[in-house]
Image: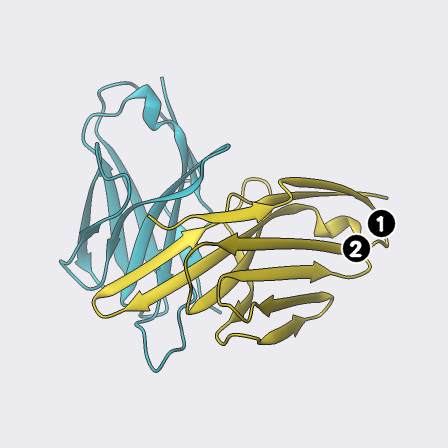
Chain colours: A yellow, B cyan
Amino acid sequence: GQQLNQSPQSMFIQEGEDVSMNCTSSSIFNTWLWYKQEPGEGPVLLIALYKAGELTSNGRLTAQFGITRKDSFLNISASIPSDVGIYFCAGLYSGAGSYQLTFGKGTKLSVIP
Amino acid sequence: DVKVTQSSRYLVKRTGEKVFLECVQDMDHENMFWYRQDPGLGLRLIYFSYDVKMKEKGDIPEGYSVSREKKERFSLILESASTNQTSMYLCASSPILAGGKSYEQYFGPGTRLTVT
């Protein structure tokens, strides 16, 4: 099946720093989704991107749908301790009779106060 | 707000037991999904359903079955639990595809199943 490479796998950053993570694929997607998962909880949708080149913000979070439709990035500005968690990207391809959501393996973010 | 609930947060079962995991969503979504999540392997799709009584195999259906008798409820069944089915199980729902939008999946809080 389709595969997503998400990087980095983990990050340790100082509170107040900006964070950047990305996902790449050899396949094209129609939609990119970014989720955050806190320990013991299910993933929560942060941002959805529907068009190549689209740049969308949600508070301190900004995500972009790559122009080639094969990649996406998520930036977090001025990180705070509650940003801790695992961030997942997911790419969706939907075509005739086909609907497949593929997840990256996650970026584990630790914020040092 | 979309709400997806799962019947148990934590479950401990013995090898060979039949296990039922229940998921309910309150947003009238057509699509429902079951995943398992394991360290280093990420989220893997077990089964999904587009409609009542419809089901499709995902990437790892072996050892599992599902039931969707009502639109809001999607059950995952482990016919004979084994230790390699110890995992975090996540249910999700999403509205039907329409005009290129509404592809988001909304997740429940998860059930951490331990099989001993």
At label 2, the amino acid type is Ser
User: Gap between marks 2 and 1, in whole Å?
Assistant: 5 Å
Estimate the x, y position of residue A42 in percent, counting from the top left: 50, 49
| Disc 2 element | loop
Q: Is residue B43 visible?
A: yes
Q: Residue at x 61, y 45 (%)?
A: A107
Q: How many marks?
A: 2
Depth check: A26 or A40 in front?
Answer: A26
* Residue placed under numbered mark 1 in the picture: A15
Depth check: A4 or A58 in front?
Answer: A4
| Disc 1 element | loop
Q: Residue at x 45, y 68 (%)?
A: A31
Quick one: quadrant of the C terminus of chain A?
A: top right
Asked if the residue under mark 1 is in contact with the one under mark 2, i.e. CB atoms within 8 Å, the reply is yes
Subunit bearing disc 1: A
Give the left or right position of residue A100, taking residue A70 as reference: left
Estimate the x, y position of residue A85 in percent, counting from the top left: 64, 46
